[in-house]
Structures are given as structure tokens and as C-alpha cells.
Image: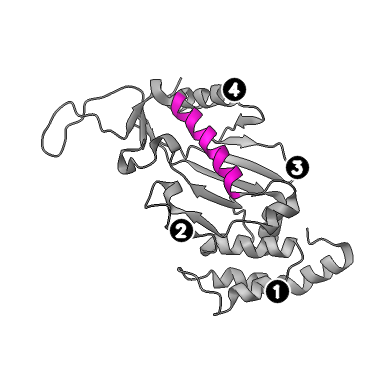
Amino acid sequence: MTFKTEIFDIGRQVAVQTADWAFSSAGDFVNKGLKHTDLVVSPGFTFNNEPSCSVTPIAGLRNKKIIRLCKEILGRDPFWTLSIKFQLESEKYRGPASPKRIYPRKVPFTTVHGEPNYWPADFITQEQTYDYLRGVLADGNEYLGRYFNFESEEALLSHLPMTYRWMDKGIGNAGLMGSFYEQMDGIIHCLAAIVLGNFEFVERYASDDFKTMAPKRMQDLAKIISALPELQRRFAETGKVV
């Protein structure tokens, strides 16, 4: 049995202890309880040949209508509708000491200063992985409830979050905020507006009056804007675009 298989088995053990959640073959915790949207909490595993794996927890969702619309207009699956990398509540404020890598067992490292038998504070062992993944799923589920409205699909898409706290990533303090209008997140907001029949938001977002920190994805926006007449026709005839 490989190290990856053993870690995934631990993920499945965690999932069966949590109602409505399963552990996927891709290494993510997935909740398919809603018809319109899958909830995903990913440990963010990246495996290598040592063997070991790095972890970068992410909580997010996959709305089926937005994914279909994105595939139709832009020709690709965005995977995430919206997501946020997060730091476990139990690890908050530890900064770089938060878990970053899992090893089968403790192995001796030598520091750059030649100190032997060093074990980094941000490494954990396979024995500690069950408790770590329980924390990932519990905190990721809490973040989803904090940022998204799951009363209905309309409530979800009409109240997608505009900002997030940098502190939720373990960075900065409660007063520092990030924007969900940057890059692909901005495109997702445009697609969500279209699903709801709001065709004006796309052009407003694309305009110079709508400020973002990073450059907008203007090629994507051009494709969306060119598709608006057909999408408006569909919505007028059927009340939906997908």
C-alpha cells in the first residue's frame, strides 16, 4: 500500500464519521446534499516521491449552473465556483508554523546551520493525520457556512460573498479584507448574475468604473458580453439561461 493510499484511507475514515460528507478519489471531502451545488473541503494534497505530501486546505463550492455556463461560453470547467484557502482555527496565528507537510513518520533533518535531528514545527506525521483531517473538514464546513447562504440556489447566487477576511487564511488581522471580485472570482460573479437574469452586471464589472486590484480577465469578459444577446433571448423565452 502506497503512502498516498494510506493517507486517502484516513480521509475516508474521517468522512464516514461526518454526516453527508464523502471522501473522493481526488482526495477531497465532498457534500452532495444540495441538488444544485456540491460543497467541497479540500486538504489540498500534493504528493511526492519522498514519500510525503504538502497540504493547503481550501473550502469552496461547485454550482452546476455556473459550471455549465462557463463551459458553454469559455470552454472550460472553472472547478471552483468560489473558494478560500484557510488556516485551521486551532492553528490560527501560528503563521508559518501551521502544518504544511505530512510524512509517514518523523525523519531526521539537518538545518542549514548543520544542526542534526531537526524536525520542522510545520511538519506532522501520518499518525497525526486523522486528527488533522478532522480539523480540516470541521473548519472547512464552518467557513462554507460563514461565507455562503444555502437557503436556496437563488439565495446562494444572489448573495455570493464580495470580501473575505485575510485572517481566515492565517494572515494579518481581522481588519484586513480581500476581494472576491479579483480575476476568476470576478468572472464567477458575472456568470452568477447571468444565471439570475441580471445581464447588466457584466458590463458594469467590465467597465473602468468597477475597480479591482488585479487586471480583469478581459478576454473572458469579451466572450461573455458577446454571448449576452443569446442568453437574454433564452431567459426571455424560458426564464433560465441553462
For badge 3, the amino acid type reads Lys
To which quarter of the image does residue 55 belong? Answer: top left
Q: Are marks 1 and 4 in contact (CB under 8 Å)?
A: no
* Cα distance between the residues tagged 1 and 3: 28 Å
How crowded pointer 1 is (Cα within 10 Å; few <14, some 14-19, many 20+) is rated as few
For badge 4, the amino acid type reads Gln
Residue 34, position as x, y percentages in the image: 72, 40
Q: Residue at x 35, y 38 (%)?
A: 98
Image quadrant where one finds the C terminus:
bottom right
For badge 1, the amino acid type reads Glu
Residue 51 seen anywhere in this rendered image of the structure? no
To which quarter of the image does residue 118 belong? Answer: top left
Tell me the number on the disc at residue 40: none
Residue 124, position as x, y percentages in the image: 35, 28
* Cα distance between the residues tagged 2 and 4: 34 Å
* Cα distance between the residues tagged 4 and 3: 22 Å
* Cα distance between the residues tagged 1 and 2: 26 Å
Q: Secondary structure at mark 1?
A: helix
Q: Earlier in the sequence, mark 4 or mark 3?
A: 4
Tell me the number on the disc at residue 35: 3
Residue 41 part of the magenta-drawn span: no
Tell me the number on the disc at residue 200: 1
Residue 79, position as x, y percentages in the image: 59, 50
Q: Earlier in the sequence, mark 1 or mark 2?
A: 2
Q: How many numbered circles does the render carry?
A: 4
Residue with the mark numbered 2? 177
Residue at the far bottom: name it: 208
Q: Main secondary structure of the magenta part?
A: helix
* Cα distance between the residues tagged 3 and 2: 31 Å
Residue 158, position as x, y percentages in the image: 69, 58
Residue at the far right: name it: 237
Q: Is residue 231 above or below residue 38?
A: below
